[in-house]
Structures are given as structure tokens and as C-alpha cells.
Amino acid sequence: MRPRIAIPIPNSDEAYTAKVMPQYRRAVELAGGEPMEIPISATPNEIAQLAKGCDGVLLPGSPADVDPQKYGSAVRDPATAPMDVARDDADELLIQDAHNMKKPILGVCYGMQTLNVWRSGTLRQHLHTCVQHEKPKDGKQRMFTAHPVVVEAGTKLAAIVGHAIGQAHGSPKVIVNSSHHQAVDQPGDGLTVSAVCPEDGTIEAFEGTSADHYVIGVQWHPERSSDDDEYSKAIFRSLVEAAREWHEMQAPDFETIRARKPNE
């Protein structure tokens, strides 16, 4: 059985989605999962019905930014990009379903940020730091920025990354690609920091504190390097394996739910 992973369409811009969606699909497939694209133009009921048939959720990146009003910021930084209402609404529906049912959730970049805000956390609207976190404005199409990340010892992410690089104990340090100008400020309810950039302290990952619910957010883009390094592969394998375990724990009639059409 290949666990079914819900992936909302990254952005209302079809050209952007066409460029990045194949990377997420391939990363999930290589990890043994079945990617299920969720149209963000669908009605809330249609999205809810599609979510019912999935075993986990992957929230992808996006060029949009979360509306600062959603996390209590009275002043909007000029660098803050417009929100994508359709993507934002779809994320909230998928996150709500996943939390109600304790389905595994992996948030990537923007997906990590929407998850944090849903959990009542806050964001830094624009990073002012010596570290280059986002691609230069005049950067080439395939150019990406990289910097080190230190994973906190004893976290779920440390176990995932450490096993992949052969470091069973301590705080694994890896180089990640980076393409963001915002980051988590205050982690939301039930979330704890699990990785930082050692050069400026930017929060690079968090995870849920509940032992029986897989929740991980990473600020970098492991889907872009899942063909190249083991720790990127390992992140997606951990999501798919958690989704498989979740599926196996469900009622015997779950296959019937998965087989239903969205309008049933």
C-alpha cells in the first residue's frame, strides 16, 4: 500500500505551479507514497472530501506570503508579498483535517509558515541578516542559495537527518538550499524549534511536541535536493512512513472512504 499524500496546488499562478509541483510529486513517489494533488480552486466541501481519502499532508512552498493580520501584526513590511487567498484557504482546511485525525503533516518553506500561523505562531516579515536566505533578485533561473543548518539534538528531525548521514547522536549539521525572505518568529502552540541557522539564529525547522502526531516544518526545500542527498530523501521517507503507520491504525472501512468520489 502506497500512502496517499495530499499536496495542495502551490500557488494560483499556473506557471509557478507547473515548475515546482513535479519536484514534490517525485519526492513523495521516491519515498514510496502516492501524491494526491488538491486543487485550490475547488470548493471547501470538495477539498474536505479529497482530504478524507489521504493519509498525510505535504504543504509546499509558494511565492505568496501569509497576511500579517493573521498573526497580529499591525504594520505590513513593504517586502511582504501579497497573500494567495485560495492557497491559504486550502491549507487551513487540510491542516484542520490533519489535526482532527492526527494525520502526519510536513510543511515546506511557505507551508511551514502557514502551519505556524494556524497554530497561533508569528512570522518575521522580512529577514535582515548577514546570511543570504533568498535567491538574489538578479539570480539565474537554476541558481540557489545554500547555508548551514544545525538540527537540535534529541528531536525527531535529528533522528531522521542523523540516521541519513550516519550521525546517531548529537546535533547534525547539514547544508541546505534556501529560498525565503520570511521565517518563523514565535513558534505556535505545541511546536518546538528543531533546527536553526548557526550564523544568524534564524529558525529553520520545528516539530510538534505531541508524541503521537507527526508534525514537522522545514524552512528549506528538500524536494529540490531529494535526488542528490540522503537527508532530503529521509525527510520525505519519514513523512510517508508516518502516513503508512497512520493508515494501518485506522478503521477497516477506511479503504471505502478513500474510494469515494469527492461529491459523494
Image (cartoon, rainbow, N blue to C red):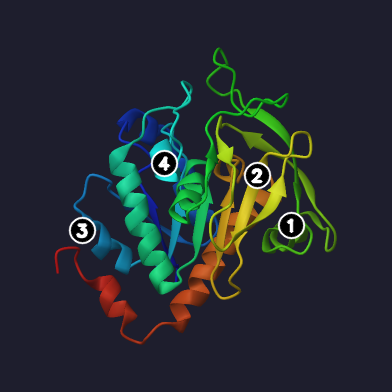
User: In the displayed image of the protein, which residue is found farthest to the left?
Assistant: 263
Identify which amino acid the numbered label 2 is placed on. Glu
Q: Which residue is mark 4?
A: 21
Of the numbered discs 3 and 4, the one sitting upstream in the chain is 4
Instruction: Establish if 163 lies above or below 90.
Output: below
Q: Which residue is mark 3?
A: 46
Image spot of residue 130 (x, y percent): 73, 24
Image spot of residue 65 (x, y percent): 43, 34
Q: Residues within 10 Å of mark 4 (few under 14, many from 20)?
A: some
Of the numbered discs 1 and 4, the one sitting upstream in the chain is 4
- The residue at 58%/38% (across/down) is 183
Of the numbered discs 2 and 4, the one sitting upstream in the chain is 4
- The residue at 22%/55% (across/down) is 44
Q: Residues within 10 Å of mark 2 (few under 14, many from 20)?
A: many
User: SS of the residue at dot 2?
Assistant: strand
Q: CA distance from mark 2 to mark 4?
A: 22 Å
Of the numbered discs 2 and 1, the one sitting upstream in the chain is 1
Instruction: Establish if 180 lies above or below 231.
Output: above
User: SS of the residue at dot 4?
Assistant: helix
Q: CA distance from mark 1 to mark 3?
A: 38 Å
Identify which amino acid the numbered label 1 is placed on. Ala
Q: Which residue is mark 1?
A: 164
Identify which amino acid the numbered label 4 is placed on. Met
In the picture, the disc for residue 204 is: 2
Identify which amino acid the numbered label 3 is placed on. Glu
